[in-house]
Image (cartoon, helix red, strand yellow):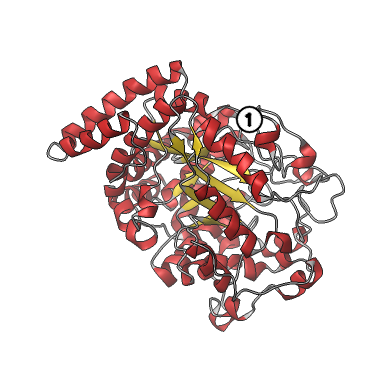
């Protein structure tokens, strides 16, 4: 489908874009009477209480039980009570509950994706970011459609990815028209798999980009955008203003924090929240995230599809990642994930390759549901480096910690009884936003997606996997099929027909 971009605004240059892009009326409607859903005074009061009194074990267990039984978003006060826990045994109870909730909602699946950076031109001046305007150490580039196809040749043709997060700097050269064209190109570019020659294409393009007006978001919806990610970076307004110059578009806190309200108004109902952990007190950020989720639920009865947990990492031309007083260690990072899973039980939790292999392995038991593999975040990095684990600081936004390939990650996950899911069926069947929320909370979606996970896992093993990974993956599939037969005996013959067709080379079959 060709995007209709006739109704979106045009800008003469970067300065014109910076002056005119924000639409004030699309902010004010979601802050009625000047009230704000990120209640700074309330958050600070709750953080102070975390420091001032120990956790009540009885109350903590009540909150955990509520989270596990209802899968409803906790109150900020309840999240704050969980933050007080310092006793290792009580925290282990919380972690185990978070893992059970993850399995209830998503079963034993882990969804994989790859980041694809389309550009590093930016009009903003974020102090911690390698892409910021004026950073002379960064080599600038915007992918052409031909260069994008070269990247897809690697991602879809050599590695076997089916899901991307496309990342864009904020700049008039990467306008809504450009974003829409790149999404269309991703979906249209099919590549033969190395083992079988079966055609593989990207089936889900999620987007990480700057906040957009409602009109622009409708354009992206028309070309099949997946989840729309906008990271707030920090919810602390004073710190936000110190990190993002007032002259920049990103300097407008309220334009950014209301981005998802506009998404849902436009019908883009899968949204991904995130902050940059290490800029501010993690307790402040997580409490604000809960408030943000609850406000989306209040307006639209739909919460965030995903929460992401990037940590501040070294980047070109900045010392903020070295000097921030709020950097967190691995144990605190795991604690954040557990509390987040308990606080917003239904959401997907993404932990990216910013983390070390050890940190991500640990996160698998803390409620994580999505991760990236074979990642290269240099502009045109996949085709230039032939998917080698190579990094160049002046071509990427930050440095990565986990360079494991998709084949390595699939093999590791399978060895621990976790199935890698390449499924994107729900999005093409309309199971998004409000349509999927109840199914997630009751656990129905996890079981339903298990079947599609098995089918897509079979696809990937046959088309891309090494011999060692196939051996471990085949054993896992046998176990998963036996489980499906046990809990869906009447439907099992239908599942097997699709599975056998997949084994014969048919692709993209789903329920």
Measured as percent of width and height from the top left, residue 54 is found at: 50, 47
Image-quadrant location for residue 455 = top left
Horizontal side of 150 relative to 302 (left or right) equals right
Residue positioned 39% across, 53% down in the render: 427
**Residue in the picture at 63% in, 45% down:** 148
Number of numbered discs: 1
**SS at mark 1 in the image:** loop
Structural crowding at the residue carrying mark 1, measured as other residues with C-alpha within 10 Å and reported as few (<14), some (14–19) or many (≥20): some
Q: Quadrant of residue 478?
A: top left
Q: Report the side of 290 relative to 311 (left or right).
A: left
Q: Position of residue 393 (x, y in %)?
A: 77, 37
> Is 267 placed above or below 458 here?
below
Nearest the viewer among 442 and 95 is 442
Q: Is residue 501 visible?
A: yes
Query: Hey, which residue is sitting farthest left in the picture?
Result: 490
Q: Nearer the viewer, residue 55 or 125?
A: 125
Q: Where is residue 185 drawn, in percent x and y?
A: 56, 51
Look at 55% across and 72% down and name the residue there: 214
In the picture of the structure, the residue carrying the numbered disc 1 is: 387
Residue 48 visible within the image: no
**Residue 9 is drawn in which quadrant?**
bottom right
Where does residue 501 sit, x and y in percent of width and height? Answer: 27, 34
Left or right of 36: which side holds 504? left
Residue at (67, 73) in percent of width and height: 22
Say which of 60 and 364 sits in front: 364
Q: Residue furthest bottom?
A: 33
């Amino acid at each position: 489908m060709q995007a209709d971009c006739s109704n979106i605004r045009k800008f003469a240059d970067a300065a014109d874009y910076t002056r005119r892009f924000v639409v004030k009326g699309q902010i004010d409607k979601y802050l009625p009477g000047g009230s704000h859903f990120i209640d700074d005074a309330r958050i600070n009061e709750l953080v102070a209480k975390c420091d001032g009194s120990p956790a009540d074990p009885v109350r903590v267990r009540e909150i955990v039980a509520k989270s596990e039984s209802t899968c409803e978003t906790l109150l900020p006060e309840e999240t704050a009570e969980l933050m007080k826990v310092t006793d290792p045994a009580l925290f282990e109870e919380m972690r185990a509950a978070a893992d059970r909730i993850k399995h209830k909602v998503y079963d034993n699946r882990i969804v994989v994706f790859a980041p694809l950076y389309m550009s590093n031109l930016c009009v903003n001046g974020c102090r911690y970011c390698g892409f910021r305007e004026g950073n002379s150490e960064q080599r600038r580039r915007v992918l052409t459609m031909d260069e994008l196809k070269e990247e897809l040749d690697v991602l879809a043709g050599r590695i076997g990815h089916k899901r991307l997060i496309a990342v864009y700097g904020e700049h008039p050269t990467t306008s809504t028209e450009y974003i829409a064209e790149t999404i269309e190109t991703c979906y249209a570019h099919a590549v033969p798999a190395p083992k079988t020659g079966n055609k593989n294409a990207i089936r889900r393009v999620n987007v990480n980009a700057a906040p957009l007006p409602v009109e622009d978001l409708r354009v992206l919806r028309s070309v099949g955008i997946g989840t729309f990610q906008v990271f707030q970076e920090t919810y602390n307004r004073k710190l936000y203003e110190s990190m993002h110059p007032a002259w920049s578009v990103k300097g407008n806190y309220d334009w950014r924090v209301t981005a998802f309200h506009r998404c849902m108004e436009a019908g883009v109902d899968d949204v991904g929240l995130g902050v940059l952990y290490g800029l501010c007190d993690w307790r402040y950020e997580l409490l604000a995230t809960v408030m943000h989720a609850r406000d989306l639920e209040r307006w639209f009865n739909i919460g965030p599809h995903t929460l992401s947990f990037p940590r501040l990492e070294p980047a070109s031309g900045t010392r903020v990642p070295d000097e921030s007083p709020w950097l967190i260690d691995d144990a605190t990072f795991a604690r954040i994930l557990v509390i987040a899973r308990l606080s917003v039980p239904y959401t997907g939790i993404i932990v990216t390759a910013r983390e070390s292999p050890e940190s991500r392995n640990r996160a698998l038991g803390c409620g994580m549901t999505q991760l990236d593999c074979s990642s290269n975040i240099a502009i045109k990095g996949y085709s230039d480096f032939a998917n080698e684990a190579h990094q160049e600081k002046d071509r990427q936004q930050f440095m990565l910690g986990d360079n494991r390939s998709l084949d390595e990650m699939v093999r590791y996950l399978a060895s621990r009884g976790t199935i890698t899911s390449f499924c994107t069926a729900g999005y093409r069947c309309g199971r998004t936003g409000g349509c999927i929320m109840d199914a997630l909370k009751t656990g129905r979606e996890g079981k339903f997606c298990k079947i599609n996970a098995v089918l897509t896992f079979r696809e990937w093993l046959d088309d891309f996997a090494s011999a060692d990974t196939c051996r471990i993956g085949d054993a896992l599939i046998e176990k998963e099929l036996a489980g499906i037969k046990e809990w869906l005996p009447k439907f099992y013959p239908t599942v097997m027909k699709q599975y056998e067709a997949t084994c014969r080379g048919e692709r993209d079959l789903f329920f």
